[in-house]
Image: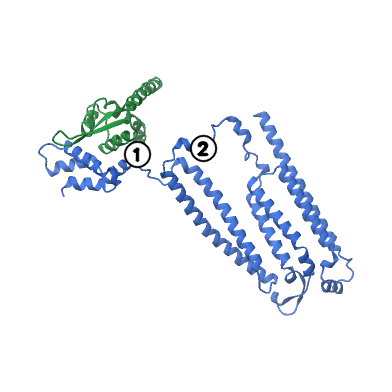
Amino acid sequence: MSELIFSLKTELRRGTLTLAVLSQLQTPQYGYSLAQRLEENNVTIDQSTLYPLLRRLEKQELLTSEWDTTESRPRKYYLLSELGQEVFKQLKEEWHNTSMQLNSML
Amino acid sequence: MNLIEMYISEVTQRLPEKIRDDIALELRSTIEDMLPDQHTDKDVEEVLMKLGDPVKLASEYNNKPRYLIGPMFYESYINVLIVATIISVVISSLMLFVNGMITFEGDKSLFTLMAFIGQLCLKMFLSSLNVLFQVFFWVTIVFIILERTEVSNGDLYNWKKKAWSPSDLYQLKKVVTKRQIPKAEVFFSLFWTALWAIILFNSSEMIGWYEQSGKGLEGLTLKAPLFNEEVLFSYAPFIVLLILIEVGLAIYKFFIGRWTNLLASLNLIYHFISVGLLCFMLTDETLYNKSFIEKLYETVPNVPAFWFVTTMATIIAVFSIIDIISGFNKAHKSNTVIDQWMKNG
């Protein structure tokens, strides 16, 4: 029973994680700073999920990345690409519509 | 090597070479970000605990499918598997059967024939098993490769089918069960063809006048074959033609899978040819072995000449007519059912 709930919850949240990540990348972020920002907003995401997700989004050309080696330790910064901006906009709209529809039903 | 490096190498050694260094660098900086400035081994352990099992992390980075054949290909995989299995098993069995027919030797009594058939069945079973494994192996390999090469899902769907519309339903061919031809029927008719061909071509040593010259079944010896071998073999081209037609019809039935007017017509032609050939052969007096006839008259002198010839011809003709009519009937029935169904739908 609890296992079923867990897997259903995970399934429900899976798509929203991408949206949450995209929303925080209007400004360049490196992995850990992004994780912290998400945590501050009470979005729980496994770090082991987050970092690979960033790479996937980069591969899908929604994000661009750049190594910053000027500070004490090198960090990889991620930022929304143009395509990423557009996708984020549309996903956001979709989210608003869906949550409105669901709210009226629930 | 410290704990962090060991963790990183546990992850990266599972990744493709190309992205290893980059991910190692990123992981290292992330882990250091997560650690307080003055950290102990315990802090490191906690951080690594947050990142979790390195194997799992590596698999997330890899993002390769963790299945052999995914939902995209599963359906076609099963279909190809079934069709390939059936075809290759049928072909390999047929080849063995024909091969057996040609190479059949021995004293060719009904007895050894039975043993021979048993052996042949075993051979066919074993070869089918072998073929089954081969087909399964190769089809699976091909689909695993398909799954892993980047055939985009959209392409596949476009290639596979046009957009579905309700009118497709009218073309459904499997709905009406009455006109379906069971696969078993097809296999049986192939088997039957092979059986009568074997017996006929070996008839000079199998069918004829048997006399008991010892004890038990093995004491039965063939005194006079029923047919005159030379005359029988002069019919061989026609018989082979009939075999080809029979096999061709069976294979056609297998693929079309249902009765149609065309199939019923072909069935009609086939029966005309076979009954015609049969009647022609049965009434050809030179076909029968003289010593067989003599022995027959010695034993039952009052039997009208070849009464069984006419009886047999009649029986076969009646069965043929029944089969012809039932073929057209099935084809017709299926048509009317479809017509009605289309009207109602």
Q: Nearer the viewer, residue B7 or B216?
A: B7
x and y, in percent, of residue B231 in the image: 80, 67
Name which residue lies at 30% across and 31% down.
Answer: A63
Which of the 4 image quadrants contains residue B147?
Answer: top left
Name the residue: 66% across, 47% down. Answer: B181
Determine whether the residue tagged by mark 1 lies in a helix, strand or loop: helix
Which corner quadrant of the image does residue A13 belong to? top left
Residue B53 visible in this rendered orientation of the protein = no
Image location (x, y in percent) of residue B225: 77, 71
Give the colour in which the image draws chain B: blue
Mark 1 nearby-residue class (10 Å; few <14, some 14–19, many ≥20): few
Q: Residue at x 85, y 62 (%)?
A: B283
The quadrant the C terminus of chain B occupies is top right
**Image mark 2: chain:** B
Q: What amino acid is labelled 1 in the image? A: Glu
Q: Which callout, 1 or 2, points to the residue nearer the camera? A: 2
* Extreme-bottom residue of the structure: B214
Taking depth in this image into account, of B69 and B52 the one nearest to the observer is: B69
**Which dot marks residue B159?**
2
Q: Secondary structure at mark 2?
A: helix
In the depicted structure, whether residue A106 falls above or below residue B159: above
Tell me whether marks 1 and 2 sit on the same chain. Answer: no
Left or right side of A85 for B133: right
The relative height of residue B127 versus residue A17 in the rendered view (above or below) is: below
Left or right: B46 in relation to B203: left
Instruction: Answer with left or right where residue A85 lies relative to residue B144.
Output: left
Residue position marked by numbered label 1 in the rendering: A3
